[in-house]
Amino acid sequence: MDVQIKKGVLDACVLYALKDGESYGYKIITDLKDVIEVSESTLYPILKRLESSGALETYSKEFNGRLRRYYTLTDTGRKKLAEYRQDFEAIITIYKRIFR
């Protein structure tokens, strides 16, 4: 898969994984495992980029003696997820026209 396409798909997948509420890195990876394979080294830069763009908010909380970072969608993140859905619909339409 093209790197740029995969980047957008991964961003959309991460936002989708957070659509119902907060989560943390390892749980996001396990939630997505049936959809797409994401490693920690791939996920954390995506989370950082989405946070920097205002799509996510974060906070840390102690869990079993360690700090765990939780991620939550912002309104910007929800809008971005909706945009990805619209992009998906447009891409499907294009592919259907090309590969009839």
Image (cartoon, rainbow, N blue to C red):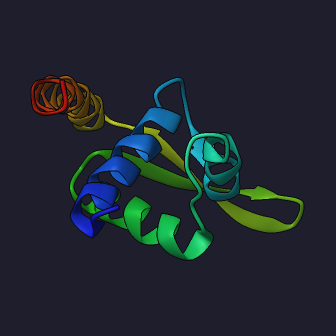
Residue 96 lies, in percent from the top left, at: 18, 24
What residue do we see at 33% from left, 58% from top? 6
Q: Nearer the viewer, residue 17 or 4?
A: 4
What residue do we see at 49% from left, 70% from top? 42
- In the rendered image of this protein, does residue 82 appear above or below residue 27? above
- In the rendered image of this protein, does residue 24 appear above or below residue 73? below
What residue do we see at 29% from left, 68% from top? 3
Compared across the picture, whether 36 is left or right of 16 comes to: right
Compared across the picture, whether 91 is left or right of 81 comes to: left
- Residue pushed farthest front? 100
Q: Nearer the viewer, residue 19 or 62?
A: 19
Q: Quadrant of residue 12?
A: top left
Residue 46 lies, in percent from the top left, at: 39, 63
What residue do we see at 14% from left, 23% from top? 93
Q: Quadrant of the C terminus?
A: top left
Q: Quadrant of residue 37?
A: bottom right
Residue 79 lies, in percent from the top left, at: 21, 29
- In the rendered image of this protein, does residue 86 appear above or below residue 51? above
Q: Quadrant of the N terminus?
A: bottom left
- Residue pushed farthest right? 64
How many numbered marks, from 0 up?
0
Compared across the picture, whether 66 is left or right of 100 comes to: right
